[in-house]
Amino acid sequence: MGCCGSTERTKREWRPLEDRSCTDLPWFLLFTVFCVGMGSICGFTIATGGAARLVYGYDSYGNTCGQRNEQIEGVRLSGLDHTDRKYVFFLDPCNIDIVQRKIKSLALCVSLCPPEHMHTYQDLKRFAMVNGSELCSYELAGHKYPGLPERFSKCPKLPVPPSKPLPVFNRCTPLDVSCYAKFAEAVVTFVGDNSVLHRLIAGVAASKEIIIGLCVLALVLSMILMVIIRYISAVLVWILTALVVLGSLAGTSVLWWLYIDHRLYGNDTSSSKVREEDEVRKDSGQALLVYAAAATVFTIILLLLMLFMRKRVALTIALFHVAGKVFIHLPLLTLQPFVTFLALLLFWIYWVLVLLFLGTTGNPVQNEETGLIEFRLTGPLQYLTWYHAVGLIWISEFILACQQMTVAGAVVTYYFTRDKNRLPVTPILSSVLRLVRYHLGTVAKGSFIITLVKIPRLVLMYIHNQLKGKENACARCLLKTCICCLWCLEKCLNYLNQNAYAATAINSTSFCTSARDAFVILVENALRVATINAIGDFVLFLGKVLIVTSTAFAGVLLLNYQRDYAEWLLPLIIVCLFSFLVAHCFLSIFEIVVDVLFLCFAIDTKYNDGTPGKEFFMDKALMEFVESSRRLERAVERGRSRVKEVVSEGAEMKPMVSDSRDEGDVAKQKSSPEEEGAPGTSSA
């Protein structure tokens, strides 16, 4: 179980091994125990009635609707038999706590939700006598509703709107949701007029077929782009490089022009100008000078980087070309985003359900403000929510890491198979089986490291939001700095983890050993890594922008028949968000493929040289890049050798030049043995 400093596998094979072994087994056992704990929380909520209270609902006295209840000590009207009362009815459903996002009204269990408007207490009495569903508190008799003095506090607020029960959750919900307008405004803060919200929702309802069609279009465009990017990568990369250079030069020139124009305008001032305006103009000139100088430094650095990294741009183009071939040979890679999203969606649904179960689990506690009964976890049980929250982060990162390991395993198999016709029938399935059989511990360890960094960042973000407007400038700056540093650390660890998974797929080594080996390879190719990440990420970002803009343009054309342009807003926002999400998922897979290919290429060029017995595994496009690099290196070496020959010839001819020195000086030079050895050394 080698760790970061172990000597495990000192001799590197750097190719897929036939005899693989389990890696990081203790971490697999730890993750299994943690998942068992997550399942135990769900079982605890079900066993203690939290799940039943969430599904069937409970009244303000602690009674669960639809079943027989036990008496709660110190709580009146508890322990009632509600077998025939299966629905939760709120006396004032519009009494909503905007901050806590919950209804503060008294809740009762009823046998039937009121299907029509009720304007008087006589209507409440008639409904109770006819249907047997009493809508006032349990201690009030239905036939006495109109004359009871308690009717104003323990009966529904008039008029009672018609309602129907929610599917599964058995809550009586008003058919007219206008009373939730205030709640909707709290959630959707940009909607000030309720009519605007209705128009936007109506636009979505009227355009649902178009929205679905545009989402499918974004999906198709993303899949097509991953295949054709191999053909347009060369042109695209060089165009982007030229645009970046020209843009930086143009921006710097404009800033210097503004500064010079400001200086000329500032000198042409009359004596009637006040001193304050002169000071403002002087400060503006200094600011422009700083901006122009900073832009100049940035442009010079950018030009130098382009000069030194121009050779490595060709490697990025070759990797993009090979990545396109990978998707042709391994078409099931395009299904990885769907599988990962489905796994995450199922887990998130389970996590939310258990979280809701926890919200209705625990001991009954009376709310001091409202007097209603609530169920809360007390004592050590309150830490179950924190355990559940950690599980959300760790298991989500675990699922994403499984995707990275699966893709890395398939790409490694493709790269290190010389004859591509002899690839396994389903390399993706083979990679999944290797992951499940050997490397779940490695994935669990890598995802746990990301969790350790993400939790403090989320805690600091929560503290920052809670203290917004209360903390001083120094504390705010310190919090933002810590959040930014943790975010940068998380991104670096994510990149290192991804390469560690690729090294594990090649060598079947533990996480720490693979991370160390991958880190060494990346450091040795630092400039190449910088070039691929900078140019490659920018190209992929432009690909996302292309998909979003194309989908939005098609949406504008399809929605053009709706003359109410306000109804375009929400459908287009939904389509653009979905298209960006789809493009990000697919192009992230493409990015992983490029990164794994680069690691394989770096290993291949380090340990192989193309001679018999050390043949390259790389693709033809990468081989052409290596050959061109070697030809360039040989040309540079020949140039250096010629320079050395010229210098050495000059050094040999220098002692032969005659001098008009007198013989005494020559004799003096010959008489000194130390000086006599120097010419001999130079001539040699």
Image (cartoon, grey):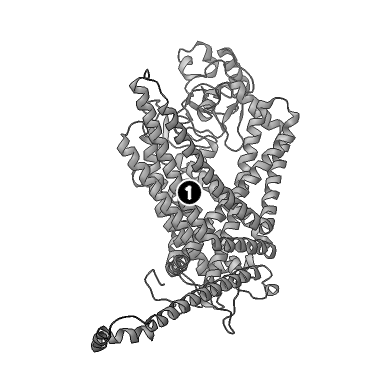
Please state if 498 lies on the left or on the right of 542 as rendered.
Answer: left
Give above or below for 627 relative to 320: below
The residue tagged 1 is 299
Q: Measuring from the top left, give residue 355's x and y in whole percent.
A: 48, 43
Comparing 481 with 637, the one in front is: 637
Write the residue at 39% across / 80% down. 654
Write the residue at 73% across / 25% down. 563
Please state if 304 lies on the left or on the right of 209 as rendered.
Answer: left
Q: Measuring from the top left, give residue 236's x and y in whole percent.
A: 63, 53
Q: Which residue type does callout 1 highlight?
A: Thr
Q: How many marks?
A: 1
Residue 227 seen in the current view: yes
Residue 651: quarter of image: bottom left
Q: Measuring from the top left, give residue 48's x and y in whole percent.
A: 45, 45
Please state if 439 lies on the left or on the right of 422 as rendered.
Answer: left
Q: Measuring from the top left, give residue 116's x and y in whole percent.
A: 64, 20
Comparing 606 with 249, the one in front is: 249
Give above or below for 276 relative to 1: above
Residue 664: quarter of image: bottom left
Few, some or many residues within 10 Å of mark 1 (<14, 14–19, 20+) = many
Give above or below for 128 relative to 262: above
Q: Quadrant of the C terminus?
A: bottom left
Comparing 113 with 677, the one in front is: 677
Write the residue at 55% across / 75% down. 634
Q: Quadrant of the N terminus?
A: bottom left
Comparing 184 with 364, the one in front is: 184
| Residue at far top of view | 147
Q: Circle 1 sits in a helix, a strand or a loop, which is it? A: helix
Please state if 662 lies on the left or on the right of 539 as rendered.
Answer: left
Residue 72 seen in the current view: no
